[in-house]
């Protein structure tokens, strides 16, 4: 009587099947209505590419959004953002990839990779990786990794890691030793304690 050919005794190999999760490409928002709709529907990350058009966002844009989300401007987008009151600490506005953004009121922005941000009023900017920042009024900037900051009025800057600062008017800075400071208000600099 012959033996049954079972899987454990089979000499035939079954092909291996590799399963991977493929994420759908992110949906791109191109205008304020699309951003508002995506945030209202609970999106955690909204990627924005304005295709060279200037968009304007304000408190109404974020009124129906949850408390935890990221709005990421990319691909050379252009935007103006004004907020009368700050967003929650878990809501993030990120500016990357040669995007240009002007912020007023109480906006908190993270800027990376050649982004340009002009900040007025009491805005806060955290800037890394070759970003260019103009800080005016009472805005505050934390800069590192080759960021260039032009500060005016009563802006305050904290800078490290090869940042370059140009200070005017009453702008002040706290810096590490690897920071270049220029401008008529360069006397308004304090060295950070080591």
Image (spheres, rainbow, N blue to C red):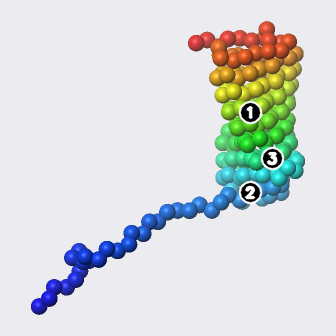
Residue 77: assigned label? 3
Closer to the N terminus: mark 3 or mark 1? Answer: 3
Q: In front: mark 1 or mark 2?
A: 1
| Of 5 and 121, the residue lying toward us | 5
| Picture coordinates of residue 190, whole percent (x, y) | 71, 11
Q: CA distance from mark 3 to mark 2?
A: 12 Å
Q: Locate the C terminus by quadrant.
A: top right
Q: Is residue 86 visible?
A: no
| Picture coordinates of residue 40, whole percent (x, y) | 74, 57
| Of 129 and 40, the residue lying toward us | 129
> Is 187 positioned to the left or the right of 70 in the image?
right
Please tell me whether residue 139 is drawn above or below residue 37 in the rendered image.
above
Q: Residue at x 82, y 40 (%)?
A: 100
| Picture coordinates of residue 187, whole percent (x, y) | 79, 8
- Name the residue tied to disc 2: 28
Q: Locate the N terminus by quadrant.
A: bottom left
> Is 28 positioned to the left or the right of 19 in the image?
right
For this orientation, the residue located farthest to the top is 187
Please tell me whether residue 151 is drawn above or below residue 129 in the rendered image.
above
Q: Residue at x 81, y 55 (%)?
A: 30
Residue 131: assigned label? 1
Closer to the N terminus: mark 3 or mark 2? Answer: 2
Q: Badge 2, how many Cα within 10 Å: few under 14, some, many 20+?
A: some
Residue 176: assigned label? none
For this orientation, the residue located farthest to the left is 1
Q: Secondary structure at mark 3?
A: loop
């Amino acid at each position: 009587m012959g033996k049954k050919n079972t899987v454990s005794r089979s000499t035939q190999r079954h092909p291996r099947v590799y399963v991977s999760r493929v994420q759908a490409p992110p949906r791109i928002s191109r205008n304020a209505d699309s951003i508002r709709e995506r945030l209202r529907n609970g999106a955690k990350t909204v990627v924005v590419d304005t295709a060279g058009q200037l968009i304007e966002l304000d408190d109404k844009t974020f009124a129906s959004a949850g408390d935890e989300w990221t709005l990421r401007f990319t691909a050379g987008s252009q935007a103006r953002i004004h907020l009368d009151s700050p967003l929650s600490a878990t809501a993030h506005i990120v500016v990357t990839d040669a995007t240009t953004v002007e912020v007023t009121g109480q906006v908190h922005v993270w800027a990376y990779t050649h982004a340009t941000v002009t900040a007025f009023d009491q805005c806060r900017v955290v800037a890394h990786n070759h970003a260019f920042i103009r800080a005016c009024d009472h805005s505050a900037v934390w800069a590192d990794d080759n960021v260039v900051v032009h500060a005016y009025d009563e802006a305050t800057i904290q800078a490290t890691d090869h940042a370059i600062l140009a200070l005017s008017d009453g702008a002040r800075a706290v810096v590490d030793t690897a920071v270049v400071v220029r401008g008529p208000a360069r006397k308004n600099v304090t060295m950070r304690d080591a």
